[in-house]
Amino acid sequence: MAKTKVVYYCQSCGAESAKWMGQCPACKEWNTFVEEAMPACHKTKPASGSGQQVKTAKLKDIETAEETRFPTRIKELDRVLGGGVVPGSMILVGGDPGIGKSTLLLQVCRNLAGDNRRVLYVSGEESLQQIKIRAERIGEFGDSLSLLCETNLDFIDSIVRKELPQVVVIDSIQTMYNENIASAPGSVSQVRESTGSLMRMAKGLGIAFFVIGHVTKEGVVAGPRVLEHMVDTVLYFEGDRHAAYRILRGVKNRFGSTNEIGVFEMRANGLEEVENPSEFMLGGKPKGASGSVVACSMEGSRPILLEVQALVCRSNFGMPRRTAAGTDFNRVNLLMAVLEKRVGLQMGSCDAYVNIAGGIKMNEPAIDLGIVLALVSSYKNKPVSEELICFGEVGLSGEVRAVNMAEQRVQEAKKLGFTACVLPESSKAALHGTDGIRLIGVKSVRDAIDLIV
């Protein structure tokens, strides 16, 4: 029987140590080391997955197939992935419990099976009957989908090599375990070794893997941080599970952009795509209310119109309260300081609450002008015109600076029926073909405030 030894792993970055330490020397996090037992000898399968001698290859001699991607027929997901699924890639999907990760990937399996692609769904958390109940809610499935309830990676490896599916879904990585590792499933070493085993299968056999990962209370994938470095793509499913909307955001993608997002709506029959997020985010916007302004933000190549709400009132305490939901709290304090210094508005004794309606999180500087106008509108108790939209970055001197992709923002506002757009003066000169919407260029926040006061 192999002798076991005790090692300590950092839960944040996966660093290994022979003894416990209060602070990790690699990532500098405190109290993250956990004790785990592992065999003294551990053999790892070769990366090729075949056991043959590994050989080098010249770049010019490598042949690529014409079909480098295949679509999932979910446009929002394909947009985030960069156009579709790359064979041999490994995609990590994280999100809060109940957000819809398993539902989304089951819908992906349905579409791929409908295209006669061989799909294997491996579940370590649900029984076959539970998966079937959820699948019946989504719709009809083709015969190309196979289900497997197993957590032992050796058994999963043998099934994958026997059936050779084109796509494999693992639900979830924290339930998988390797018999060569003595620690419990979900531990740092098990998650790392399980991901390594799946990665070898993906690269060696050319199979696309979708891996579901649990998240911590901070919202990041549980386990070592090295897990995100090992996979090709990392997607996060965001949103309140009690609300209808869901946002799929790519934070790492070796085959596409990391600036794209996909918007979904949870319904009784599964997740439905939201093809026009701007109209979805502006639904229910109040009319004639002060402190409400429509701004435009860019997520990748997609302009999204959103409602910025602000509430400014006199504070009854010595320390005014400031709250920001959906945007950076420090950015709101900075903009309020600009208003007080450059415009002369006495907000130092006022409570201020800023909210991005719809629950979406936006930190792009282009919504600065929207936050400023919303704060002034609430402070003056004067509503902003329903037909007006704004965007622009605000500097510390009170100037309104240019932002990128101004023409796409204006076209999106024009498409949704807005008749006036407040934008930086430097961006206005570069716009062409904007008939039907009035462009108002401003150089400073004082110019913008004069439009609504």
Image: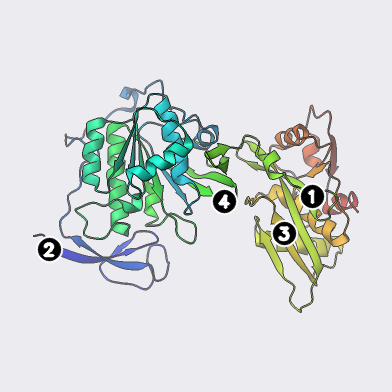
At 39% across and 71% down in the image, what residue appears?
31
The quadrant the C terminus occupies is: bottom right
Spatial CA span between label 3 and label 1: 16 Å
- First in residue order: circle 4 vs circle 1: 4
Q: Secondary structure at mark 4?
A: loop
Q: Secondary structure at mark 1?
A: loop
Q: Are the residues at dot 2 and dot 3 in contact (C-beta closer than 8 Å)?
A: no
Residue 285 lies left or right of residue 53; in this view the side is right
Residue designated by label 4:
239
Residue designated by label 2:
3
At 21% across and 41% down in the image, what residue appears?
46
For the rendered model, the colour scheme is rainbow
- First in residue order: circle 2 vs circle 3: 2
- First in residue order: circle 3 vs circle 1: 1
Residue 27 lies left or right of residue 282; in this view the side is left
State the residue in front, 356 or 28: 356
The quadrant the N terminus occupies is: bottom left
Q: Secondary structure at mark 3?
A: strand
At 28% across and 32% down in the image, what residue appears?
205
Image depth: mark 3 or mark 1 in front: 1
Image depth: mark 4 or mark 3 in front: 4
Residue designated by label 3:
354
State the residue in front, 333 or 76: 76
- Whether residue 449 is situated above or below residue 110 in the rendered picture: below
At 78% across and 45% down in the image, what residue appears?
390
Q: Residue furthest left?
A: 1
Residue designated by label 1:
286
Q: Is residue 133 visible?
A: yes
- First in residue order: circle 2 vs circle 1: 2
Q: Secondary structure at mark 2?
A: loop
